[in-house]
Image: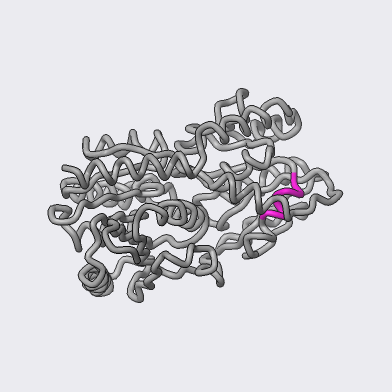
Amino acid sequence: MLAGRKKILYVVESMGGGVFTYIVDLANTLVDIYDMYIAYAVLKQTPANYKAYFDKRIKLIEVKNFCREIRLTRELTTVKEIKQIADEIKPDIIHLHSSKAGVIGRIAFDGKKVPLFYTPHGYSFLMKDAGVIKRSVYWGIEKIFAKRDCTIISCSRGEYQESLKLTSNATYVNNAINIEKMKGRLKEVKEEKHPFTVFTLGRICYQKNPVQFNKIAQAMPDTKFLWIGDGDLKSELYSPNIEITGWIDREMALKKSMNADVFILTSLWEGLPISLLEAMYMKKLCIVSNVTGNRDVIQNRENGYVCDTVEDFVIAIKENNPRYREQAYRDLINHYDTKVQAKRYADIYNERLGR
């Protein structure tokens, strides 16, 4: 690491899916400016060769005690472990990523000595698989920890609006993708002759609403549907015209995506999905559910379709207006490039360091 450069420590619990892509692209860009350290958890959906995705200048530190379930003794052990990591690194900035890391990190650090930031990547209290009481508890936890000296940096305007209900110490930087890297990767992808295909990408879980995805497929029995990913709820995808790839590497996922035609997201809630941004860059028609995150990016019948019902999705898929593909691509290029995102983060970090 270079002497005189500021050190940034990212604490990341959700090291998989879109958050993983986000962290890789952002850290790989910021490492030209700062010394980057990432303390993380390994999940089922974390790529087996995840270290290969990161610039070699980035220091990766696995947090052994992170777990998805809430276990008080385990959480306290995780707090201790993260504090020890920070004591060794002595970072100038600490940035927490995901709700779990946000709680653990705001217990471990008070934000007074070292500037503290937190990005939820989708608040837990918005999760519709939790009951009203559980979501109220999650909201209460966020409200309590929002009193910490910590700036919330939301990943979309919609999430930012939720943050303002918790604290005025908030801002937002839209999720983005590394356009230059995507361009290089897609050059290696061979497009093949294929049947008209409707696809999505991500973990097969309640949030992504596989039940509705299955209903859409059932309503269009002569159309091929593709789910790139895996998860505990794959049994909900039983329509015979659905193919499930299971967890596959990045290159194969891109190949599968490029050899499909329409991208859909049936999510019940979102932060700002990276898979959607990538589909926009690939000039796939994007059809999304009417939730925060999705509708922050897609404007109905301007650069894609925003849908409420199975019937809405079916109509949009059949209509398949090519003009929306081009507009979505232009919007992606102009607003969702990692270079723009990284500069915004650097401005936020430097402004806080300068106080």
Residue 299, quarter of picture: top right
- Residue 106 drawn at (x, y percent): 22, 57
Q: Can you say whether 274 is above or below 335 in the image?
A: below
Left or right side of 331 for 259: right
Q: Is residue 147 visible?
A: yes
Let me know if residue 9 is in the magenta part: no
In the rendered view, tell whether residue 213 sits above or below residue 62: above
Image coordinates of residue 206 in percent, x first then y, are 51, 53
The majority secondary structure of the magenta stretch comes to: helix
Q: Give x and y (percent) for residue 198.
A: 72, 44
Residue 9's spot in the image, x, y percent?
Answer: 31, 60
Q: Identify which residue is drawn at 65% across, 47% down.
A: 183
Residue displayed at 37% across by 71% down: 61
Is 211 on the left-hand or right-hand side of 189?
A: left
In the image, farthest residue toward the left: 112
Q: Residue at x 25, y 49 (%)?
A: 142
Residue 271 lies in what quarter of the image? top left
Asked if one can make out residue 269 in the rendered structure from this viewpoint, the answer is: no
Give the residues drawn in magenta, as a range.
254-260
